[in-house]
Image (cartoon, rainbow, N blue to C red):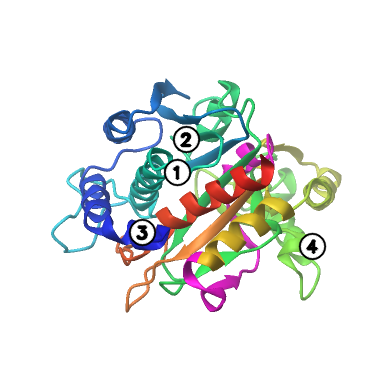
Amino acid sequence: MNLLERAQSLAADLSAIRRDLHQHPELSFQEVRTAGIAARELEALGFSVRTGIGQTGVLAELHNGEGPVIALRADMDALPIKEANTHEFVSQNAGVMHACGHDGHVAGLIGAARILAEEKDSGRLPAGTIRFLFQPSEESTDDEGKSGAMRMVEEGVMEGVDAVVGLHLGGPLPTGKIFFASGPIMAGAAEVHIDVLGKSSHAGMPEAGVDALVLAARGVVAVQDAAPENRSPVEDGLISFGQISGGTATNVLADHVAIHGTMRFFSEETRDRLRRRLDEAFGVLVESGAEVRINVETGILPVINDERVTASVRAAAIDLVGEDAVLPIEPMTLAEDFSFLANEAPGTFFWVGAALPRPRMHHEADFDIDESALPIGAATLAAGAIRLLQEMG
Protein backbone atom coordinates (compact mmCIF):
# COMPACT_ATOMS: atom_id res chain seq x y z
CA MET A 1 0.00 0.00 0.00
CA ASN A 2 1.11 3.57 -0.63
CA LEU A 3 1.01 6.14 2.16
CA LEU A 4 -2.53 7.31 1.40
CA GLU A 5 -3.86 3.75 1.30
CA ARG A 6 -2.18 3.06 4.61
CA ALA A 7 -3.68 6.21 6.09
CA GLN A 8 -7.10 5.21 4.83
CA SER A 9 -6.70 1.83 6.55
CA LEU A 10 -6.48 3.87 9.78
CA ALA A 11 -9.62 5.88 8.99
CA ALA A 12 -11.84 4.18 11.58
CA ASP A 13 -9.25 4.64 14.32
CA LEU A 14 -8.65 8.28 13.41
CA SER A 15 -12.38 9.00 13.44
CA ALA A 16 -12.72 7.30 16.82
CA ILE A 17 -9.89 9.41 18.26
CA ARG A 18 -11.34 12.58 16.77
CA ARG A 19 -14.83 11.84 18.11
CA ASP A 20 -13.50 11.08 21.58
CA LEU A 21 -11.64 14.39 21.60
CA HIS A 22 -14.73 16.13 20.25
CA GLN A 23 -16.78 14.81 23.16
CA HIS A 24 -14.20 16.05 25.66
CA PRO A 25 -13.04 19.48 24.44
CA GLU A 26 -10.66 21.53 26.56
CA LEU A 27 -10.02 25.24 26.46
CA SER A 28 -6.65 26.91 25.91
CA PHE A 29 -3.90 25.83 28.33
CA GLN A 30 -6.33 23.31 29.88
CA GLU A 31 -5.75 20.47 27.37
CA VAL A 32 -4.66 17.92 29.98
CA ARG A 33 -6.79 15.00 28.78
CA THR A 34 -6.08 15.71 25.10
CA ALA A 35 -2.34 15.92 25.73
CA GLY A 36 -2.50 12.66 27.69
CA ILE A 37 -4.07 10.86 24.74
CA ALA A 38 -1.46 12.22 22.33
CA ALA A 39 1.39 11.28 24.68
CA ARG A 40 0.01 7.77 25.24
CA GLU A 41 -0.42 7.13 21.51
CA LEU A 42 3.14 8.17 20.67
CA GLU A 43 4.67 6.39 23.63
CA ALA A 44 2.99 3.22 22.35
CA LEU A 45 4.90 3.69 19.09
CA GLY A 46 8.20 3.77 20.97
CA PHE A 47 8.85 7.49 20.53
CA SER A 48 10.59 9.60 23.15
CA VAL A 49 7.90 11.80 24.69
CA ARG A 50 7.96 14.91 26.87
CA THR A 51 4.85 16.47 28.37
CA GLY A 52 4.00 19.74 30.11
CA ILE A 53 5.77 21.88 27.53
CA GLY A 54 4.27 25.34 27.21
CA GLN A 55 2.04 24.31 30.15
CA THR A 56 0.14 21.45 28.49
CA GLY A 57 2.00 20.74 25.24
CA VAL A 58 3.56 17.48 24.12
CA LEU A 59 6.82 16.93 22.22
CA ALA A 60 7.57 13.48 20.81
CA GLU A 61 10.44 12.39 18.57
CA LEU A 62 11.01 9.57 16.13
CA HIS A 63 14.78 9.12 15.85
CA ASN A 64 16.31 7.47 12.81
CA GLY A 65 19.99 8.27 12.83
CA GLU A 66 21.82 11.45 11.92
CA GLY A 67 20.04 13.80 9.58
CA PRO A 68 17.64 16.73 9.37
CA VAL A 69 15.03 17.47 12.03
CA ILE A 70 11.50 17.94 10.66
CA ALA A 71 8.76 19.21 12.98
CA LEU A 72 5.06 18.42 12.48
CA ARG A 73 2.52 20.39 14.49
CA ALA A 74 -1.11 20.00 15.60
CA ASP A 75 -3.01 22.39 17.86
CA MET A 76 -5.23 20.94 20.59
CA ASP A 77 -7.53 23.57 22.12
CA ALA A 78 -11.28 24.07 21.79
CA LEU A 79 -13.47 27.17 21.98
CA PRO A 80 -15.95 28.56 24.53
CA ILE A 81 -18.98 27.82 22.32
CA LYS A 82 -22.10 25.82 23.16
CA GLU A 83 -22.42 23.10 20.53
CA ALA A 84 -25.58 23.05 18.40
CA ASN A 85 -24.97 19.73 16.62
CA THR A 86 -27.08 16.63 17.29
CA HIS A 87 -24.71 13.84 16.24
CA GLU A 88 -23.88 11.11 18.72
CA PHE A 89 -20.52 12.57 19.73
CA VAL A 90 -21.51 16.10 20.76
CA SER A 91 -19.48 17.86 23.42
CA GLN A 92 -20.01 16.66 26.98
CA ASN A 93 -18.29 19.76 28.36
CA ALA A 94 -21.04 22.36 28.63
CA GLY A 95 -20.25 25.57 26.79
CA VAL A 96 -17.07 24.23 25.16
CA MET A 97 -16.71 22.65 21.74
CA HIS A 98 -14.21 21.89 19.01
CA ALA A 99 -15.52 24.49 16.57
CA CYS A 100 -12.32 24.84 14.55
CA GLY A 101 -11.22 21.28 13.80
CA HIS A 102 -8.36 20.93 16.28
CA ASP A 103 -9.74 17.54 17.33
CA GLY A 104 -9.14 16.45 13.74
CA HIS A 105 -5.66 17.98 13.73
CA VAL A 106 -4.64 15.91 16.76
CA ALA A 107 -6.11 12.73 15.26
CA GLY A 108 -4.36 13.43 11.95
CA LEU A 109 -0.96 13.93 13.56
CA ILE A 110 -1.38 10.68 15.50
CA GLY A 111 -2.14 9.00 12.17
CA ALA A 112 0.99 10.50 10.62
CA ALA A 113 3.02 9.22 13.56
CA ARG A 114 1.73 5.67 13.03
CA ILE A 115 2.57 5.78 9.33
CA LEU A 116 6.07 7.13 9.95
CA ALA A 117 6.72 4.53 12.65
CA GLU A 118 5.87 1.83 10.09
CA GLU A 119 8.21 3.47 7.59
CA LYS A 120 11.05 3.31 10.10
CA ASP A 121 10.30 -0.31 11.03
CA SER A 122 10.33 -1.29 7.36
CA GLY A 123 13.64 0.50 6.72
CA ARG A 124 12.10 2.98 4.27
CA LEU A 125 12.34 6.12 6.41
CA PRO A 126 15.21 8.45 5.41
CA ALA A 127 17.76 9.28 8.09
CA GLY A 128 16.90 12.05 10.49
CA THR A 129 14.46 12.95 13.24
CA ILE A 130 10.77 13.76 13.07
CA ARG A 131 9.53 15.91 15.94
CA PHE A 132 5.80 15.89 16.74
CA LEU A 133 4.41 18.99 18.41
CA PHE A 134 0.98 18.84 20.04
CA GLN A 135 0.46 22.48 20.86
CA PRO A 136 -1.88 24.10 23.39
CA SER A 137 -3.73 27.38 23.06
CA GLU A 138 -3.78 28.38 19.42
CA GLU A 139 -7.10 30.13 19.98
CA SER A 140 -6.14 32.28 22.94
CA THR A 141 -3.32 33.73 25.00
CA ASP A 142 -2.40 33.62 28.67
CA ASP A 143 -2.22 36.47 31.16
CA GLU A 144 1.05 37.60 29.60
CA GLY A 145 -0.43 37.70 26.10
CA LYS A 146 1.40 34.58 24.95
CA SER A 147 -0.13 31.79 22.89
CA GLY A 148 0.74 28.12 22.99
CA ALA A 149 3.20 28.36 20.09
CA MET A 150 4.96 31.28 21.75
CA ARG A 151 5.27 29.33 25.00
CA MET A 152 6.54 26.19 23.27
CA VAL A 153 9.14 28.19 21.32
CA GLU A 154 10.33 29.74 24.59
CA GLU A 155 10.84 26.22 25.96
CA GLY A 156 13.02 25.21 23.02
CA VAL A 157 10.79 22.99 20.87
CA MET A 158 12.19 24.53 17.67
CA GLU A 159 15.86 24.15 18.57
CA GLY A 160 17.67 22.28 15.80
CA VAL A 161 14.59 22.12 13.55
CA ASP A 162 15.32 22.35 9.82
CA ALA A 163 11.70 22.62 8.63
CA VAL A 164 8.26 22.77 10.24
CA VAL A 165 4.92 21.72 8.75
CA GLY A 166 1.36 22.32 9.92
CA LEU A 167 -2.10 21.86 8.49
CA HIS A 168 -5.63 23.10 9.02
CA LEU A 169 -8.84 21.30 8.14
CA GLY A 170 -11.11 23.58 6.13
CA GLY A 171 -14.79 23.26 6.97
CA PRO A 172 -15.90 25.19 3.85
CA LEU A 173 -13.22 23.75 1.51
CA PRO A 174 -14.04 20.80 -0.77
CA THR A 175 -13.17 17.41 0.69
CA GLY A 176 -10.41 15.55 -1.11
CA LYS A 177 -8.57 18.71 -2.09
CA ILE A 178 -5.33 20.03 -0.55
CA PHE A 179 -4.45 23.71 -0.72
CA PHE A 180 -1.00 25.34 -0.78
CA ALA A 181 0.50 28.79 -1.22
CA SER A 182 4.02 30.15 -0.94
CA GLY A 183 4.60 33.44 0.83
CA PRO A 184 1.89 35.07 2.95
CA ILE A 185 -1.03 32.74 3.73
CA MET A 186 -2.39 33.79 7.15
CA ALA A 187 -2.48 37.30 8.54
CA GLY A 188 -0.76 38.66 11.57
CA ALA A 189 -3.13 40.04 14.19
CA ALA A 190 -2.80 42.60 16.94
CA GLU A 191 -5.47 43.65 19.42
CA VAL A 192 -6.18 47.38 19.53
CA HIS A 193 -7.36 49.15 22.70
CA ILE A 194 -8.18 52.86 22.62
CA ASP A 195 -9.34 55.10 25.45
CA VAL A 196 -10.85 58.49 24.62
CA LEU A 197 -11.01 60.71 27.71
CA GLY A 198 -13.19 63.81 27.75
CA LYS A 199 -15.05 65.86 30.36
CA SER A 200 -18.55 65.11 31.53
CA SER A 201 -21.25 67.77 31.69
CA HIS A 202 -25.00 68.07 31.59
CA ALA A 203 -26.30 66.93 28.21
CA GLY A 204 -28.22 70.19 27.95
CA MET A 205 -24.96 72.14 28.28
CA PRO A 206 -22.55 70.33 25.97
CA GLU A 207 -20.35 73.43 25.67
CA ALA A 208 -19.29 72.86 29.28
CA GLY A 209 -17.81 69.43 28.59
CA VAL A 210 -15.79 67.41 26.10
CA ASP A 211 -17.98 64.68 24.59
CA ALA A 212 -15.81 61.57 24.54
CA LEU A 213 -18.52 59.53 22.81
CA VAL A 214 -18.87 61.84 19.81
CA LEU A 215 -15.12 62.21 19.50
CA ALA A 216 -14.58 58.44 19.73
CA ALA A 217 -17.11 57.96 16.94
CA ARG A 218 -15.22 60.47 14.81
CA GLY A 219 -12.02 58.52 15.35
CA VAL A 220 -13.59 55.21 14.38
CA VAL A 221 -15.07 56.68 11.20
CA ALA A 222 -11.80 58.44 10.33
CA VAL A 223 -9.87 55.16 10.58
CA GLN A 224 -12.25 53.43 8.19
CA ASP A 225 -12.41 56.41 5.80
CA ALA A 226 -8.61 56.38 5.58
CA ALA A 227 -8.57 52.82 4.24
CA PRO A 228 -7.76 52.65 0.51
CA GLU A 229 -10.67 52.03 -1.86
CA ASN A 230 -10.72 48.56 -3.41
CA ARG A 231 -8.16 47.66 -0.78
CA SER A 232 -6.15 44.47 -0.89
CA PRO A 233 -5.97 42.81 2.55
CA VAL A 234 -2.50 41.48 1.64
CA GLU A 235 -1.07 44.84 0.61
CA ASP A 236 -3.07 47.21 2.81
CA GLY A 237 -4.12 45.14 5.81
CA LEU A 238 -7.23 46.12 7.72
CA ILE A 239 -8.49 47.52 11.01
CA SER A 240 -11.81 46.37 12.43
CA PHE A 241 -13.52 47.58 15.60
CA GLY A 242 -15.72 45.11 17.45
CA GLN A 243 -16.52 46.80 20.75
CA ILE A 244 -17.19 50.31 22.03
CA SER A 245 -18.46 51.30 25.47
CA GLY A 246 -18.80 54.43 27.57
CA GLY A 247 -21.06 56.86 29.29
CA THR A 248 -23.10 56.63 32.48
CA ALA A 249 -26.50 58.19 31.75
CA THR A 250 -28.61 59.48 28.88
CA ASN A 251 -28.39 63.08 30.09
CA VAL A 252 -24.67 63.19 30.87
CA LEU A 253 -21.91 63.62 28.31
CA ALA A 254 -19.54 60.64 28.41
CA ASP A 255 -16.13 61.41 29.87
CA HIS A 256 -14.60 58.06 28.89
CA VAL A 257 -15.13 55.78 25.91
CA ALA A 258 -13.23 52.51 25.39
CA ILE A 259 -12.83 51.08 21.90
CA HIS A 260 -11.51 47.60 21.13
CA GLY A 261 -10.64 46.10 17.77
CA THR A 262 -8.07 44.22 15.75
CA MET A 263 -5.47 44.89 13.07
CA ARG A 264 -4.70 42.31 10.36
CA PHE A 265 -1.53 42.52 8.30
CA PHE A 266 0.91 40.45 6.23
CA SER A 267 4.11 42.40 6.84
CA GLU A 268 5.70 44.57 9.51
CA GLU A 269 5.60 47.48 7.06
CA THR A 270 1.83 47.16 6.80
CA ARG A 271 1.51 46.83 10.57
CA ASP A 272 3.44 50.07 11.04
CA ARG A 273 1.26 51.80 8.43
CA LEU A 274 -1.91 50.70 10.20
CA ARG A 275 -0.55 51.99 13.51
CA ARG A 276 0.11 55.38 11.90
CA ARG A 277 -3.46 55.41 10.61
CA LEU A 278 -4.73 54.93 14.16
CA ASP A 279 -2.46 57.66 15.51
CA GLU A 280 -3.51 60.13 12.82
CA ALA A 281 -7.25 59.42 13.06
CA PHE A 282 -7.44 59.63 16.84
CA GLY A 283 -4.65 62.17 17.30
CA VAL A 284 -6.78 65.01 15.91
CA LEU A 285 -9.24 64.49 18.78
CA VAL A 286 -6.72 66.18 21.06
CA GLU A 287 -7.49 69.45 19.28
CA SER A 288 -11.06 69.14 20.61
CA GLY A 289 -9.89 68.74 24.18
CA ALA A 290 -9.77 64.95 24.47
CA GLU A 291 -6.99 62.81 25.83
CA VAL A 292 -6.34 59.70 23.73
CA ARG A 293 -4.49 56.55 24.74
CA ILE A 294 -3.77 53.90 22.10
CA ASN A 295 -2.40 50.48 22.97
CA VAL A 296 -1.60 47.98 20.22
CA GLU A 297 -0.61 44.60 21.64
CA THR A 298 2.30 42.58 20.28
CA GLY A 299 -0.10 40.07 18.77
CA ILE A 300 0.40 37.23 16.30
CA LEU A 301 2.92 37.22 13.45
CA PRO A 302 1.73 36.57 9.89
CA VAL A 303 2.29 33.08 8.51
CA ILE A 304 4.77 33.34 5.64
CA ASN A 305 5.26 30.00 3.91
CA ASP A 306 8.80 29.20 2.82
CA GLU A 307 8.98 28.62 -0.94
CA ARG A 308 11.27 25.58 -0.80
CA VAL A 309 9.46 23.78 2.03
CA THR A 310 6.08 24.52 0.47
CA ALA A 311 7.19 23.17 -2.90
CA SER A 312 8.50 20.01 -1.28
CA VAL A 313 5.35 19.22 0.71
CA ARG A 314 3.16 20.20 -2.24
CA ALA A 315 5.05 17.74 -4.46
CA ALA A 316 4.53 15.03 -1.85
CA ALA A 317 0.80 15.82 -1.83
CA ILE A 318 0.63 15.55 -5.62
CA ASP A 319 2.21 12.12 -5.40
CA LEU A 320 -0.54 11.11 -2.98
CA VAL A 321 -3.71 12.53 -4.53
CA GLY A 322 -2.78 13.71 -8.02
CA GLU A 323 -2.16 17.18 -9.39
CA ASP A 324 -5.86 17.92 -9.97
CA ALA A 325 -6.56 17.61 -6.24
CA VAL A 326 -3.78 20.01 -5.17
CA LEU A 327 -4.93 23.61 -5.54
CA PRO A 328 -3.71 27.14 -4.80
CA ILE A 329 -5.27 29.21 -2.04
CA GLU A 330 -5.46 32.95 -1.51
CA PRO A 331 -4.07 34.54 1.67
CA MET A 332 -6.60 34.80 4.51
CA THR A 333 -7.05 37.53 7.07
CA LEU A 334 -7.47 34.85 9.75
CA ALA A 335 -4.60 34.59 12.25
CA GLU A 336 -2.64 31.45 13.20
CA ASP A 337 0.13 31.21 15.77
CA PHE A 338 1.91 28.57 13.68
CA SER A 339 3.68 31.75 12.57
CA PHE A 340 5.88 31.66 15.68
CA LEU A 341 7.10 28.18 14.76
CA ALA A 342 7.72 29.20 11.15
CA ASN A 343 9.61 32.25 12.41
CA GLU A 344 12.18 29.88 13.94
CA ALA A 345 12.68 27.57 10.91
CA PRO A 346 11.47 27.46 7.29
CA GLY A 347 7.91 26.21 7.29
CA THR A 348 4.71 25.61 5.40
CA PHE A 349 1.10 25.68 6.54
CA PHE A 350 -1.47 24.09 4.24
CA TRP A 351 -5.22 23.42 4.22
CA VAL A 352 -7.07 20.14 3.75
CA GLY A 353 -10.65 20.37 2.50
CA ALA A 354 -13.18 18.87 4.90
CA ALA A 355 -16.55 20.18 3.74
CA LEU A 356 -19.74 18.24 4.47
CA PRO A 357 -22.59 18.36 1.92
CA ARG A 358 -23.67 21.47 3.81
CA PRO A 359 -20.32 23.14 4.55
CA ARG A 360 -19.80 24.41 8.10
CA MET A 361 -18.02 27.58 9.06
CA HIS A 362 -15.28 27.73 11.67
CA HIS A 363 -16.06 29.14 15.12
CA GLU A 364 -19.80 28.52 14.69
CA ALA A 365 -21.94 26.34 16.97
CA ASP A 366 -22.71 23.75 14.28
CA PHE A 367 -19.16 23.38 12.97
CA ASP A 368 -18.32 19.87 11.78
CA ILE A 369 -16.06 18.18 9.25
CA ASP A 370 -16.09 15.35 6.73
CA GLU A 371 -13.93 12.80 8.52
CA SER A 372 -12.65 11.38 5.23
CA ALA A 373 -10.25 14.34 5.37
CA LEU A 374 -8.46 12.85 8.38
CA PRO A 375 -6.44 10.18 6.52
CA ILE A 376 -5.68 12.68 3.75
CA GLY A 377 -4.18 15.05 6.30
CA ALA A 378 -2.28 12.27 8.06
CA ALA A 379 -0.83 10.95 4.80
CA THR A 380 0.19 14.42 3.61
CA LEU A 381 2.00 15.20 6.87
CA ALA A 382 3.83 11.86 6.69
CA ALA A 383 4.68 12.18 3.01
CA GLY A 384 5.84 15.76 3.46
CA ALA A 385 8.12 14.79 6.33
CA ILE A 386 9.64 11.93 4.32
CA ARG A 387 10.29 14.16 1.31
CA LEU A 388 11.86 16.87 3.47
CA LEU A 389 14.16 14.34 5.10
CA GLN A 390 15.21 13.17 1.64
CA GLU A 391 15.78 16.63 0.22
CA MET A 392 17.48 18.15 3.27
CA GLY A 393 19.58 15.11 4.15
Q: Mark 4 to mark 1: distance in Å?
A: 29 Å
Q: Image quarter for residue 158? A: top right
- Tell me, yes or no, whether the highlighted magenta stretch contains residue 326: yes
The mark nearer the N terminus, 4 or 1, is 1
Instruction: State the residue in front, 338 or 292.
Output: 338
Check residue 133 in the rendering and tell me which mark sits there, or answer none: 2
Q: Which residue is mark 3?
A: 375
Label 1 crowd (10 A; few <14 / some 14-19 / many >=20): many
Q: Are marks 2 and 1 in contact (CB under 8 Å)?
A: yes
Q: How many marks?
A: 4
**Element assignment for label 4:** helix
Q: Which residue is mark 1?
A: 74
Q: Quadrant of the C terminus?
A: top right
Q: Amino acid at mark 1?
A: Ala
Q: Are marks 2 and 3 in contact (CB under 8 Å)?
A: no
Please, is residue 38 above or below residue 324 in the view?
A: above
Please, is residue 140 above or below residue 383 in the view?
A: above
Check residue 330 in the rendering and tell me which mark sits there, or answer none: none
Label 4 crowd (10 A; few <14 / some 14-19 / many >=20): few
Q: Image quarter for residue 220? A: bottom right
Q: What residue occupies the far left of the structure in this picture?
A: 88
Q: Mark 2 to mark 3: distance in Å?
A: 18 Å
Q: Quadrant of the N terminus?
A: bottom left
Check residue 235 in the rendering and tell me which mark sits there, or answer none: 4
Q: Amino acid at mark 2?
A: Leu
- Tell me, yes or no, whether the highlighted magenta stretch contains residue 301: no
Q: Mark 4 to mark 3: distance in Å?
A: 36 Å
Label 3 crowd (10 A; few <14 / some 14-19 / many >=20): many
Q: Which residues are magenta?
A: 320-346
